[in-house]
Image: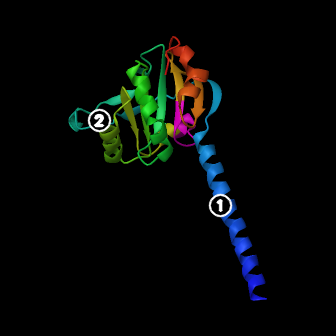
Amino acid sequence: MHSSVRNKLITLFSIALALVVAFSFALDSKQQSTTVSKQKRAFPEFISSELVGDERDSRDTQDLTLADITQHPYQLVNVWASWCGICKTEHAFLLKLQNKGIPIVGLNYRDNPAAAINVLSNDGNPYSKVISDPQGELALELGVIGTPETYLVDADGQIIKKLLGVLNESVWQDELARYFNGADG
């Protein structure tokens, strides 16, 4: 009788463990996938501080506006945070794009500025400018759902596309490369 109860408990535990493992894999793959939506709306007007690292004195901090992030025919605005594990997944690819001359502006979302500067100092900085958004006010106006998100913005300040999730080689080739003269990732 005891072995029957023990076998049932082992079976129940095994099923529960299998469900937890399956859910974990499903959640991880969901976070790694990217959803693309076409947008035709204006990037919100804003005035925000620039996140600066050790290479510049913090007293030299300047305010950034929409004009500072629309200096190219197309640019990417990447929403990220030092606490975002998925953001770390795409960081190396962003550096690769930067090395190819792709203009990328960072939007540091609800983050500790020192932690964000630390990530950029240690892992490399793929951004031409980084907008500091510690309270998430600009992100709220943009409609940010989570990190990472990447917006394709044209020189007129219009959002062309919004990508929710990791920007990688496949997403780059399928969705964005053609806007940058077919630049390879």
Q: Tell me, for residue 52, which label it has, or none.
A: 2
- Give the SS element for disc 1: helix
Q: Is residue 180 above or below residue 132?
A: above
Distance from Cα at disc 2 to Cα at disc 1: 42 Å
Rendered location of residue 51, percent (x, y): 33, 36
Q: Quadrant of residue 170?
A: top right
Within-10-Å neighbours for mark 1: few <14, some 14–19, many 20+:
few
In this view of the protein, which residue sits in the foreground, 180 or 62?
180
> Do the numbered discs 2 and 1 sit on residues whose CB atoms are within 8 Å?
no
- State the extent of the magenta-drawn residues as a range: 140-150
Disc sitting over residue 100 in the figure: none
The residue sitting at the front extreme is 3
Q: Amino acid at mark 1?
A: Val
Amino acid marked by disc 2: Val
Instruction: Choose top left, top right, bottom left or bottom right for residue 4.
Output: bottom right
Direction from residue 15 to residue 27 in the image, left or right: left
Q: Earlier in the sequence, mark 2 or mark 1?
A: 1
- Asked if one can make out residue 3 in the rendered structure from this viewpoint, the answer is yes
Q: Is residue 20 magenta?
A: no
Residue 66 seen: no
Please tell me whether residue 58 is drawn above or below residue 64 in the rendered image: below
Near mark 2 (Cα within 10 A), the count class, few <14, some 14-19 or many ≥20, is: many
Q: Residue at x 29, y 35 (%)?
A: 52
Tell me: 43 left or right of 59. Answer: right
Q: Secondary structure at mark 2?
A: loop
Q: Residue furthest top?
A: 181
Whether 111 is drawn above or below 107: the answer is below
The N terminus: image quadrant: bottom right
Check disc 1 and report the residue beneath it: 20
Task: Please give the name of the residue rendered at 40% of the width and 31% of the height, measured from the top-left corner.
Answer: 47
Image spot of residue 130 (x, y percent): 37, 32
